Structure formats: C-alpha cells, structure tokens
Image (cartoon, rainbow, N blue to C red):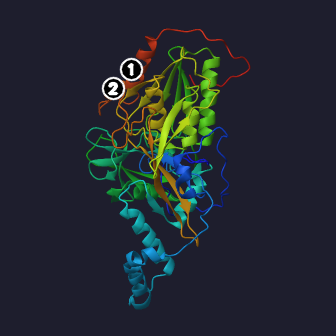
Amino acid sequence: MLPTQPPADEVPSSDAPSRGVSPTVAPSPASAQPTAASRIRHLPWYVALVAILGGSGLFLSGFALGAQRASTPGTPASAQEAFQPFWDTFNSIENDYALDPVSRQTLVEGAIKGMINALGDPFSQYLSPNDFQNTLESLAGTFSGIGAIIPATSTSDNSACTTLSPTCTLVVSSVIQGAPADRAGVLPGDRIVSIGGVSLVGSVDDAVARIRGPKGTTVVLGIDRGTSSTPISISIVRDIVVQKEVETRSLASGTVGYIRLVGFSDSSARDFAAAVKADVAAGQTRLVVDLRGNGGGYITAAQAVASQFLSDGVIFYEQGADGVETATNATAGGAAIDPRIKVVVLMDGNTASASEIVAGALQARGRAQLIGSQSYGKGTIQAFQQLSDNSGGFRLTIAKWLTPDKVWINHVGLTPDIPVTVPADTPAGSDPVLDRALQVLAGAPSASLPSTPGFALAHAA
C-alpha cells in the first residue's frame, strides 16, 4: 500500500459515539517499497487500503489517517470556464434561495459528495464528519455495534451482491462470542430483512450504519431464519465490541493447523504470524488458511501475511493513475516458507481485496491451492483524506493492484484450484469446503521439520 498503515471493512454509523482518537499513524516497515500510489501527486495525506467497504465487515471501518493537504489553490485561470456553472449555482443558492437557509458547509459537503458520486465507483465515497470520526475510532479494534459479520449475499446462490433488495440481503456469517448479537440469539445463516421495521433496500453502507449505534441503544432486526413464513424480530442492545481477527484450531488429530483470518490490520498480521510460527514449532506441516468472508484491510498486513509463506519475490503489483507498475515484494523471516509445509487457502464470494492479494500471490507463486468458490473480485486500492473545517473526509480509488503474473481480477475474482459448491440447504455445523481441504491435505506427503523450542501458542481443539 502506501507508506502508512491502512485497514478493513464497514462504513461506520453516523450515530455511533464520538471518542477522541489520536491521528498518529504507525509507519510501515522499512523494507516496504515505494508504491505507484505513494507518488501520485505527492500526496502525504493519503493512506490506502483494500477492503470491501460495504456489507462484508463487522461494522468496522479500517484505515489510517494521514496529514491534511496544505495547499488550496482555488480555481486556476485555465479552468475558470469549466467551473463557472458551479460558481453560478453556488452563488445563486447563497444569494437567492428563498426557503430555509442552508449553511455554506452543508453546500460544500454536498458538492464534494456529488463529485465523488459522479465517479460511479462504489468504493469511492464521501464521509460525513461523524462517519469520519467513527472510522478513526475503529482503528483501535473496538467499535459500538452488535458484533456480527454480515456480508451482502444473493438469495438465489449465496454469491456476493452489492445493492440490497428482496434478492440481495445481509446474511450473518458469524457472530462474536459474548457480543450483543450472540447474547440476543442471532445465528450464523440468519438473513436480516429489516431494521426497525423498515425493509432493507439500496445501500449496504446505509444499512450497516443503521445497525451500528451508541452503546446502550437498541436496534430491532427482522430475521428470516427459513423456519416460518414470517420473519422473527430480535431486539439487540448495542455494546462496545472487540473484534477477534485471528482464530486457530488443531484439526485431524493435531496434524493440521487451521488459522482463520477475518481482517487485515496491524494486530491481525502479528497474531497471524504468531499462529503460523506456533503451528510450525509444533511440527505441523499441513496448514489451512481460511479467508472466507474476509473483506480486506491494510495492504501492509496483506504483505506480512503472504510473507509467512513466501521468502522473496513479488506479492502484487500496484498501478497508479500514471500507469506505472510497482512491485511489492515479500519480506524475509516467514515461519512457513519451507516448501515441505503444505498450504491450502479457503475462499468464497466474500473473500476480497487484501484477502485476494494474499490468495492470488500464493496461487500464482505455486505456494498454495485455493479451495472453495470464486472470490469477490476487487482489484482496486482506496485512500482516505480528512477535509478541513470539520467537513469530514472521503475515500478515493487511487490505484489498481495486479497479481504476481500481472492479472487484474477486478469484477472477476480468483478462480479456485479446487471448486467446492456449498448448497443453500447445507446443515448448520457442516463445512464442505473445510472437509475438502482436509481431504486434499491428507493426500499431501508428510514432512519432518526441525522443532523451534521456546515458542508456544495455545490452540482451541
């Protein structure tokens, strides 16, 4: 990504609590190469991320904040004619609008929002001051909400979708243990069809914003569980939720290490590295990396995760507005770079962005087999800028990313090496994709690796 760290998932709610957050950004590793995006117009205020910013997260926005751009050149003489209609409209509203007065800040924010919307890019978006502040809060890894991962999913084939309708709904893929959704009885597989009695239609971001909210407030969800013709109503009291991004288990009688990654942040990259190191230290030479439902996050985290399995070489290319392609390479020191360690990656239609960078790199470099269904197909990188005068900020697509063999997967996705179809009526608790992964690893030759004493990480059996 860019020289500073960026992160994962949902656009925050406009009514979430406002807490002070330091805008300080952790620097990227010294070994990180300058990227094409980092050279775009010399933007010191830009920080980039790769994430599905709608419908796939845990009501969490992830990014890092850069310094505000200093120069405000105004309308250059060469653009006076092009901007004249804008100024004519602005001046007419300020001087002649006869109904309730509208503040200049509201007009400016509307103009910015209109410019961003004119791009027709679902991943570029204006953020109100509250939304921008709430996004900052999410950097700490905590947020106020219900604690459920809810990708937008088609009712016909469970594929990812982007606009809510009767055939595209929010589906609970998992809940955080002990979080409000868990305590209220929300289950994986529940389809959210209404919020506060209002059916879900249109923007995924807007729906997520309505589900999030201040601690202690209540949201009422209409849930279609497929057990009756009438949705059930579940009231949930929002609370502060801490997201756990790395989950580990030992499978197949302790012979296979399983690591599920649900986001790409600085902490998740560190926890992931520790989990891989622990598995290898325990002598496990078969690893499952589960990226299903992972909508992305920091590019630096994606680089760190892929580097656990690749000792060197290209992880992805970044192509900025100038068309220049710049490689981001693996960093040394990965715990599972030994080719005797067999790796499979699980993915689905909501595996996106940073997840696709990792999966695409391991597939293209021959380091892992991909198992599951076609991934989401988001091949772009976004950056955030905070605006002056408490005007919020925006995220903007500033680059494409390409796989190591220079394939742009946007709107296409990654094709699994071993496709597995999961029927809509799959019983709760069963996992055909993981079952297939274990079959594949069972057929892989065993290897004996030297042990690494002095390091241990507890696994849930």
- The tag on residue 130 is none
- Quickly name the residue at label 2: 420
Question: Which residue is at the front of the view, 180 or 440?
Answer: 440
- Quickly name the residue at label 1: 436
Find residue 374 and report its horizontal and vertical position in percent.
34, 34
Which quadrant of the figure contains the N terminus?
Answer: top right
Residue 218 vertical placement versus 185 (above, below): below
Question: Which residue is at the front of the view, 157 or 326?
Answer: 326
Question: Which residue is at the front of the view, 123 or 62?
Answer: 123
Residue 89 vertical placement versus 121 (above, below): below
Kind of residue sitting beneath label 1: Arg
Which quadrant of the figure contains the C terminus?
Answer: top right
Q: Is residue 216 visible?
A: no
Residue 347 vertical placement versus 454 (above, below): below
Q: Residue at x 59, y 64 (%)?
A: 69
Find residue 336 and report its horizontal and vertical position in percent.
58, 22
Q: In the displayed structure, does residue 224 sit left or right of residue 447?
A: left
Of marks 1 and 2, which one's residue comes earlier in the chain? Answer: 2
Q: In the displayed structure, does residue 418 sit left or right of residue 236?
A: left
The reply to whether the C-beta atoms of the residues labelled 1 and 2 are less than 8 Å apart is: yes
Q: Residues within 10 Å of mark 1 (few under 14, many from 20)?
A: some
Find residue 262 and report its horizontal and vertical position in percent.
51, 38
Q: How many marks?
A: 2
**Quarter-wise, where is residue 118 in the image?**
bottom left
